Amino acid sequence: MKVEVKLFAVAKQIANAESVAVELADRATVGQLRDALVAQFPGLAPVMSHIAVAVNAQYSADDVILTADSEVACIPPVSGG
Amino acid sequence: MKVEVKLFAVAKQIANAESVAVELADRATVGQLRDALVAQFPGLAPVMSHIAVAVNAQYSADDVILTADSEVACIPPVSGG
Amino acid sequence: MIELTNDPIDPTSLLQQVASHQAGAVVLFLGTTREFTGSRQTESLDYECYPEMAEKKLNELECEARDRWSIVDCAIVHRLGQLGLGEASVAIAVSSAHRKNAFQAGQWLIDTLKEVVPIWKKENWADGTTDWVHPGLTNEE
Amino acid sequence: MIELTNDPIDPTSLLQQVASHQAGAVVLFLGTTREFTGSRQTESLDYECYPEMAEKKLNELECEARDRWSIVDCAIVHRLGQLGLGEASVAIAVSSAHRKNAFQAGQWLIDTLKEVVPIWKKENWADGTTDWVHPGLTNEE
């Protein structure tokens, strides 16, 4: 399946894109998405462990299972306020 | 000596005066002033232990010695803010 | 900056007074007139003070806050006279590089103001009676 | 009430939104743009967010604050886009019957906002370089 991933701040800057399409096996997990992102954008490797992944606008652990219509986003450490 | 004492809030209300002149011995203390005030205004008796005395705009203990030109005030528990 | 005033308090002017390019945080506290104290209804409040000593104490509070916390600027205004419901009786604004100092100094300033500054309020109750408020002596707030 | 906006924040409007005859205290927090971070000089800041999630998280924060403290009203506004020095990036106003709740809720709201709400700032330094700020990853604030 193809999952659309929103990118923000330094993640957007590294990938040079506001969102990217990632090809994943059906029922892939957030952890597998991380690996696929790093494979696609090696520049993300050093920061990926600091990036949270949100699925449907909720912080999600690596074992959460994705579907093709999941709204997925990479959330680098936030700095609002 | 005669000392002028400013009164505020409930003390002013009980004595029905914004300030009162109290006759004291020379070198009288704040404690002696308290006794004289209660003698002059018996209504102050039940509240006097809760009232602070300020001498020259400074909270002052009962052993502080007064002079005729001391600026003296009765400070009931404050409720600003 | 400290001020005792008979005029309504303007929070915007206080915020401008403490604004600074060195500040990353501003904390503003407003004390406002509540309608109910338990089941008793307030119609208005009268504030009076011992002016010379109140100014002296407010200045001491500002100095002590500047000693104790790293703050950029600080402004304290207390209103006197008669206040209607919802009006601000006191405003304290503190700016600092980092927010923790502004919060701590602001809270300490209002806590300490309420303990030591010779200002008193009289409740004008809706039933027509009035009471000077003297914590520990008469009505608690 | 929560809001994400590209317009300058008006603190007076926030204070009016939380004003109430039930409130004896209002605490307003403003986060403002500092000129210096250590020795580095800021010229402006850019804020961006993940809008759907930022709104959801801000609403969750407001609900949790209302659950945890007895507050009368609460308003949170975060600015987005480019900000000059001294401008407010965030404003949080909390009203409550007694001041302790307003202080605690206000401080918790800004602390938690800075941890969980997906908003990011980019420093535009005076030397012409720029940096996304990612605590723990890049420049600490």
Image (tube, coloured by chain):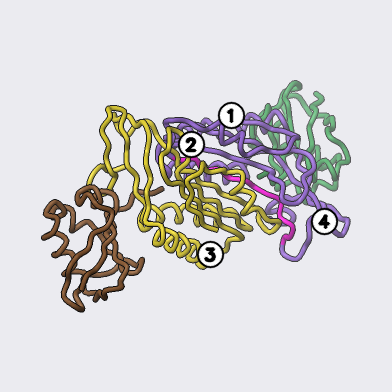
Chain colours: A brown, B green, C purple, D yellow
Q: Residue at x 25, y 51 (%)?
A: A12
Residue occupied by mark 4: C125
Q: Are marks 4 and 3 on the same chain?
A: no
Circle 4 or circle 2, nearest the eye: 2
Who is closer to the viewer here, A17 or C6?
Answer: A17
Circle 1 or circle 2, nearest the eye: 2
Who is closer to the viewer here, A21 or D89?
Answer: A21
Residue occupied by mark 2: C95
Q: Residue at x 50, y 35 (%)?
A: C65
Q: Amino acid at mark 1?
A: Met
Q: Which residues are magenta?
A: C25-37
Q: The residue marked by circle 3 belongs to what chain?
A: D
Give residue B35's quadrant in the image. Answer: top right
Does the residue at mark 4 contact the one at mark 3 (Cβ under 8 Å)?
no
CA–CA distance between discs 4 and 2? 37 Å
Where is residue B45? Give x, y as percent: 79, 48
Residue occupied by mark 1: C1
In the image, which disc is placed on residue D66?
A: 3
CA–CA distance between discs 4 and 3? 30 Å
Where is residue D10? Give x, y as percent: 57, 43
The quadrant of the image that shows the C terminus of chain B is: top right
The kind of secondary structure element at disc 2 is strand
